Image (cartoon, rainbow, N blue to C red):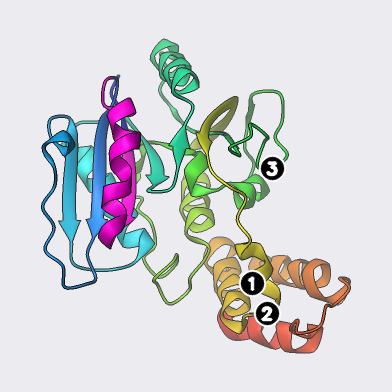
């Protein structure tokens, strides 16, 4: 069983990877998608050779980068890929335990979610203490740095990241949810395993939803893409109620009236 680590980075961020990949390379193959959007010419150090494959791409877009990693994993005959970013660190011992867990699983018929923690060892969100299979609504709670994707299952159904979603795309959020929705729609399993593998600070990007119109528009588009016309309308309305209509508004926040207009704009 071959588990690879796929890392997205941009411009000079590639140099911050050395300390991380040097720890990983003893036990894992590593694929790096290096997106270059400036005019610099990059030369990679010798340490980023061997079982570290760096793929330069002169483009931007997080989902595009993720798809480069998926295609490379297929070419490398990988069984699983853990999706990651340049600013992510790893619990190496737990990562090895997770790998052994996959090896001992004869079925190999699932994708996986694992835990992510902060630098002081605290869970980044509320996780179950037990292993379980994710339902459709659970996928909206999964971050990309908590994902281990089964390459054979993705290849079988031609599933990739939707490049209309994610940082650098027209809709700058939602790429994880859209991918996982496509996985669940095709009756593929996603299993949560309560093992902490990645280390990353808690982001504040969720607060942008209440102040940046494009973030609201993107949610509308995401609900349509994931659920379709009728169920998507219901889920969008429930989201609006929870996040805008029933929430106490802070100064500078988008009003509930404007929020529903923006959601509908994205949905259309």
Q: Position of residue 208 (x, y in %)?
A: 64, 72
Position of 62 relative to 22 (above/below)? below
Magenta region: 6-26
Position of 37 relative to 121 (above/below)? below
Residue at disc 2, secondary structure: loop
- Residue 159, magenta (yes or no): no
Q: Which residue is mark 2?
A: 211
Q: Quadrant of the C terminus?
A: bottom right
Q: Quadrant of the N terminus?
A: top left
Q: Main secondary structure of the magenta part?
A: helix
Residue at disc 1, secondary structure: helix
Taking depth in this image into account, of 73 and 188 the one nearest to the observer is 73
The earlier-in-sequence mark between 3 and 1 is 3
User: In the image, which disc is placed on residue 208?
Assistant: 1
Q: Residue at x 39, y 62 (%)?
A: 162
Q: Residue at x 22, y 72 (%)?
A: 38
Q: Position of residue 151 (x, y in %)?
A: 32, 36
Location of residue 206 by image quarter: bottom right
Residue at disc 3, secondary structure: loop
Q: Residues within 10 Å of mark 1 (few under 14, many from 20)?
A: few
Taking depth in this image into account, of 79 and 173 the one nearest to the observer is 173
Q: Position of residue 64 (x, y in %)?
A: 31, 61
Marks 3 and 2, how far apart in space?
23 Å
Marks 1 and 2, how far apart in space?
5 Å
Q: Do tag 1 and tag 2 residues touch (Cβ < 8 Å)?
A: yes
Q: Residues within 10 Å of mark 2 (few under 14, many from 20)?
A: some
User: In the image, which disc is placed on residue 257?
Assistant: none
Q: Residue at x 26, y 20 (%)?
A: 26
The earlier-in-sequence mark between 3 and 2 is 3
Q: Is residue 243 visible?
A: yes
Q: Which residue is mark 3?
A: 125
């Amino acid at each position: 069983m071959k588990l690879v680590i796929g890392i997205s980075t941009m411009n000079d961020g590639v140099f911050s990877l050395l300390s991380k990949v040097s720890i990983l390379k003893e036990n894992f193959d590593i694929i790096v998608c290096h997106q270059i959007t400036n005019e610099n010419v990059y030369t990679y150090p010798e340490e980023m050779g061997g079982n570290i494959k760096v793929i330069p791409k002169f483009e931007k877009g997080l989902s595009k980068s993720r798809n480069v990693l998926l295609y490379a994993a297929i070419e490398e005959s990988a069984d699983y890929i853990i999706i990651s970013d340049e600013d992510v660190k790893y619990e190496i011992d737990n990562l090895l335990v997770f790998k052994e867990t996959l090896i001992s699983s004869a079925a190999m018929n699932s994708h996986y979610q694992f835990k992510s923690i902060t630098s002081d060892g605290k869970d980044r969100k509320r996780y179950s203490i037990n292993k379980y299979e994710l339902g459709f609504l659970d996928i909206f709670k999964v971050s990309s740095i908590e994902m281990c994707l089964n390459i054979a299952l993705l290849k079988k159904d031609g599933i990739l990241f939707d490049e209309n979603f994610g940082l650098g795309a027209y809709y700058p959020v939602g790429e994880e949810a859209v991918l996982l929705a496509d996985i669940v729609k095709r009756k593929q399993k996603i299993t949560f395993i309560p093992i902490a593998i990645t280390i990353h600070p808690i982001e504040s990007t969720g607060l942008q939803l209440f102040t940046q119109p494009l973030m609201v528009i993107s949610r509308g588009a995401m609900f349509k893409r994931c659920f379709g016309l009728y169920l998507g309308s219901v889920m969008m309305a429930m989201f609006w109620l929870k996040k805008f209509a029933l929430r106490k508004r802070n100064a500078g926040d988008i009003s509930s009236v404007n929020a529903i207009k923006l959601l509908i704009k994205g949905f259309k």
